[in-house]
Image: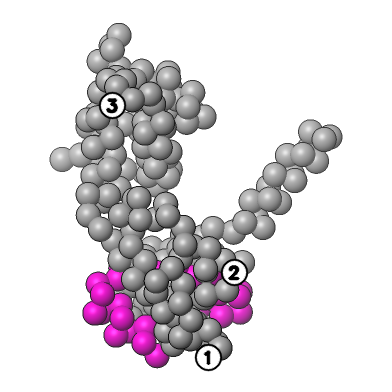
């Protein structure tokens, strides 16, 4: 039985996968040092992370690229399609709905929702914006398991509660606020303003 994978390792797995995909076509193996340099971590951390997958490089050879890509993809659940709904169809919600990277990773946007009646009925990338009253039925009918919150801050918690009640099991929160924990729901937060404040901290500290 493989050991549980730490959360910090899970967060690095998509980075490793992207690095593997960026290797030159036909490259059959990759050393931990090379992968570490591409991922911005040290080689010992790469080896430790990949050991949780049961993957161990061969001394002097490294890791088999295709096998490692497959292992990481399986751990991340990328061998199947995932249905996703987006709540909040403002500028950010529209950009997310049009983002081709989701489809490349087998995440299919199957529903768009907004509480603003002026937006309901509009078409975004082939999908029609629906009212919040349709959230539960759409999640059930289309098998959605992931919900994206791209609403204003004041509406985010209520939307998260509605997503959980509708059967969504994982939430990606783009709203500039913290959503309180919900039983049985994995919540990830993407706050662009927080990230740029972190950058300003380092600029300020370095006297730039």
> In the displayed structure, does residue 202 sit left or right of residue 17?
right
Going 37% across and 83% down the picture, which residue do you hit?
135
Q: Write down the residue under mark 1.
A: 117
- Secondary structure at badge 3 equals helix
- Secondary structure at badge 2 equals helix
The answer to whether residue 161 is visible is no
Please determine whether, in this image, residue 194 is positioned above or below residue 145: above
Going 80% across and 41% down the picture, which residue do you hit?
204
Image quarter where the C terminus lies is top right
Q: Within 10 angstroms of label 1, few (less than 14), some, or many (20 or more) residues?
A: few
For marks 3 and 1, give the CA distance: 49 Å
Q: Write down the residue under mark 2.
A: 91
| Camera-side mark, 3 or 1 | 1
Quarter of the image where one finds residue 60 = top left
* SS assignment for the magenta stretch, majority: helix
Farthest-out residue, top? 60
Q: Nearest the camera: 150 or 116?
A: 116
Q: Write down the residue under mark 3.
A: 65
Q: Within 10 angstroms of label 3, few (less than 14), some, or many (20 or more) residues?
A: some
Q: Bounds of the magenta span?
A: 133-157
């Amino acid at each position: 039985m493989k050991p549980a994978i730490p959360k910090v390792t899970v967060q690095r797995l998509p980075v490793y996968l992207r690095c593997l995909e960026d290797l030159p076509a036909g490259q059959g193996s990759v050393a931990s040092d090379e992968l570490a340099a591409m991922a911005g971590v040290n080689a010992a951390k790469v080896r430790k992370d990949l050991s949780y997958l049961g993957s161990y490089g061969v001394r002097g050879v490294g890791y088999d690229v295709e096998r490692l890509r497959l292992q990481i993809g399986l751990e991340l659940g990328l061998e199947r399609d995932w249905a996703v709904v987006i709540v909040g169809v403002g500028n950010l919600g529209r950009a997310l709905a049009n983002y081709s990277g989701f489809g490349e990773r087998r995440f299919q946007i199957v529903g768009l929702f907004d509480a603003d009646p002026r937006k309901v009925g509009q078409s975004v990338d082939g999908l029609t914006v629906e009212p919040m009253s349709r959230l539960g039925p759409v999640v059930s009918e289309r098998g959605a398991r992931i919900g994206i919150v791209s609403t204003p801050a004041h509406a985010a918690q209520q939307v998260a509660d509605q997503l959980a009640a509708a059967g969504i099991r994982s939430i990606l929160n783009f709203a500039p606020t913290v959503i309180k924990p919900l039983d049985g729901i994995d919540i990830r937060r993407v706050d662009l303003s927080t990230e740029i404040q972190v950058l300003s901290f380092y600029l300020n500290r370095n006297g730039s």
